[in-house]
Amino acid sequence: MKKIIALVLALMLTVTCFAACGKKGGDAKKKYTVGICNYVDDASLNQIVDNIKKQLASVAAEKGVEIEVKYDNCNGDSVVMNQIISNFIVDKVDLMVGVATPVAIAMQAAVDIPVVFSAVSDPLGSKLVDSLDAPGGQITGTSDYLNTNAIMDLILLKDPDIKKVGLLYDVGQDSSTKPIVDAKAYLEAKGIEVIERTGTTVDEVTLAAKALVSDGVQAVFTPTDNTIMKAELSICELLSEAGIPHYTGADSFALNGAFLGYGVDYANLGVETANM
């Protein structure tokens, strides 16, 4: 959590630059257009979007300006995502908001329009920012950095004698890369066997979950992985019937049936994103 706060505070500096760019001849603009693209329709990311909209409305009223929000959801489809971003460019939005890592990366590469990202687990690893103190370029944002070790502690708290843990994730999800490495290092250091299973679609994830049941794992861990989240409704009953708790990095998993969701407050993340 300390790292998330540090990111939010450090990147506030970039917002000053964005505000200055909105002035011409000493007079501030009276209307701004913000294009928001959400990566997938899930409880956590939807909380971010809802709170961005509410906070932008509040800020607009406070500053005496109008903020028009253009919103769309690409549902994990890169073709649709790029089309949404293209539409924002054609509409000449003043700023784009990318919710989740893939959207933020696509927006950054698209055009010279300021970008504020949200729910990017590893801004440095994703190469969205040069550093947490000086992001560089016309980009800033908030992170849902995951305290993986804290979740591992919870697994051992529930079952101190656990011998085998499954890691379920999508290798193509940037949000899973570092947490999976951290989880393996933590578990292996304690002599706990680690079994990895991956999937990129709901069907593949379901097969991977069935394989973990056959592998005899005693718990399953998934980071803030949107692919697995979309499949949670399909696998939660399967894991539950096998008596295998699913530990995850966001509340949306638990809302869809996982044993535990542990991570940042996504409503507050939305507010901070709007403030930036």
Image (cartoon, helix red, strand yellow):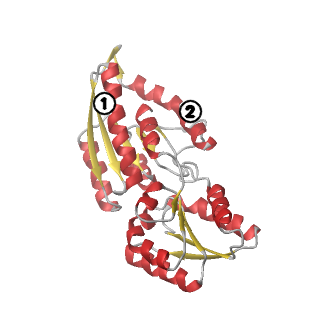
Is residue 79 toward the left or the right of residue 174 in the image?
left
Viewer can see residue 253: yes
Residue drawn at the location 32% of the way across and 38% of the way down: 53
Give the residue displayed 53% in from the left and 29% down from the top: 13
Quadrant of the snapshot with the N terminus: top right
Q: Quadrant of the C terminus?
A: top left
Helix, strand or loop for disc 1? helix
Foreground label between 1 and 2: 1
Q: Assess disc 1: are there few (<14), some (14-19) or many (≥20) residues with their C-alpha within 10 Å of its C-alpha.
A: some
Q: On the picture, is 235 further left or further right than 163? A: left
Q: Position of residue 195 (x, y in %)?
A: 61, 77
Residue 9 is labelled as: 2
The residue nearer to you, when weighing 207 against 7, is 207
Residue pointed to by mark 1: 57
Position of residue 252 measured from the top left corner of the image (x, y, whole percent): 43, 57
Residue at (35, 44) in percent of width and height: 49
CA distance separating discs 1 and 2: 22 Å
Q: Is residue 49 left or right of residue 158?
A: left
Amino acid type at image mark 1: Ala
Q: What number is the disc on residue 202?
A: none
Q: Residues within 10 Å of mark 2 (few under 14, many from 20)?
A: some
Could you tell me which secondary element the residue under label 2 belongs to? helix
**Looking at the image, residue 85 lies above or below residue 56:** below
- Residue type at tag 2: Leu
Q: Is residue 111 visible?
A: no
